Image (cartoon, rainbow, N blue to C red):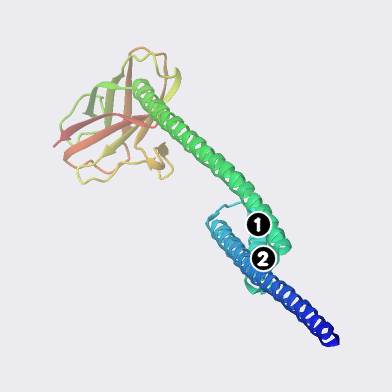
Amino acid sequence: MSSQIDAMQNESKDRRNNIIVIVLSVVLVVVLVMFFMQRRDNRGIIKEITAEKDSIQFELTEIAASYDSLKTENDTINEQLFVAQAKVKDLLLEVEQTKKVSYAKISDYQNQVNTLRGIMRDFVVQIDSLNRRNEELMAENLEVKQQYKEVEQQNQQLNQEKQQLQQNLKRAAMLEARELTATALNERSKETKFAKRTAKLRIYFVLGQNTTTKRGPKEIYARIMRPDQLLMVKSENDVFQFEDLKIQYSAMREVVYEGKDLPVAIFWDNVNEPELMPGVYTVNLFADGNEIGETTFEIK
């Protein structure tokens, strides 16, 4: 009887041990399954975080390249660009050197990337606006230069027309000597053809009518050139203004001109002078700084 009870007790004890083993086995299996599942999940999380990190590095590299392409001549914006670009490069270096990354860190990096990208967009807008304004200013500058060039050309044309008008007026105002003749006279004021008998020279002409020239006193200068091309003069101080020079004259007479034909005679007195040489003489007349006539005569 006692042996039966012991057998029953042993059987009950074995059954209980078996149950415990089974339960422990089940628990172990569950733990192992959960461990591998957790490990798998952790690998997925690490892979996902690594992918996010790589994505952030790529975005930062793109932003850095975009900063390199931004160009402007505005010194203030260039300084701001330098600071912002330095921040991008610093963050990129930090991300590259970070070994252990969490979701929180990734989120922080992403926020910084978004901020830096927004700053870059603001720079792009500012620079585009400045570039457009510069293009507008350049276009306006070109237009102003073109207008200035046109005005300058018009002024040059007006100056040329003014100069031409002044020249025309000057030519129109020039006196003209008509009927200009030069004659040798003897001591009795009779015409002669011989140098030995010449006592004086008479230069006769008519100042033509001119309503443009200034009226009033006019000084008429005569230059008499001998056949040997020497100028006949009485004094070295007998000079008048012609263009930019002061030149000598042989004889001079002052007349009062009223705009109408005016007969004039100018004389060269050869008394107490060396005897005139035979040959062809040239006479030039000047008034108001202009040459108004020329003629020649010959004595034997």
Front residue of 93 and 12: 12
Front residue of 198 and 79: 79
Front residue of 18 and 298: 18
Q: Residue furthest right?
A: 2
Quadrant (top left, top right, bottom left, bottom right) of the C terminus: top left
Residue labelled with disc 1 = 113
Q: Earlier in the sequence, mark 2 or mark 1?
A: 2
In this orientation, does residue 18 appear?
yes
Q: Residue furthest left?
A: 300
Q: Amino acid at mark 1?
A: Val
Residue labelled with disc 2 = 91
User: Horizontal and vertical percent for residue 14?
Assistant: 76, 81
Q: Residue furthest front?
A: 1
Describe residue 285's horizontal placement relative to residue 240 as left or right: left
Rate crowding at label 1 as few (under 14), some (14 to 19) or many (20 or more) other CA atoms within 10 Å. many
Question: Within the image, what quadrant is residue 105 found in?
Answer: bottom right
Describe residue 172's horizontal placement relative to residue 69 as left or right: left
Residue 115 versus residue 198 in the image, above or below: below
Give how far apart the Cα atoms at labels 2 and 1 are: 9 Å
User: Horizontal and vertical percent for residue 46?
Assistant: 63, 68
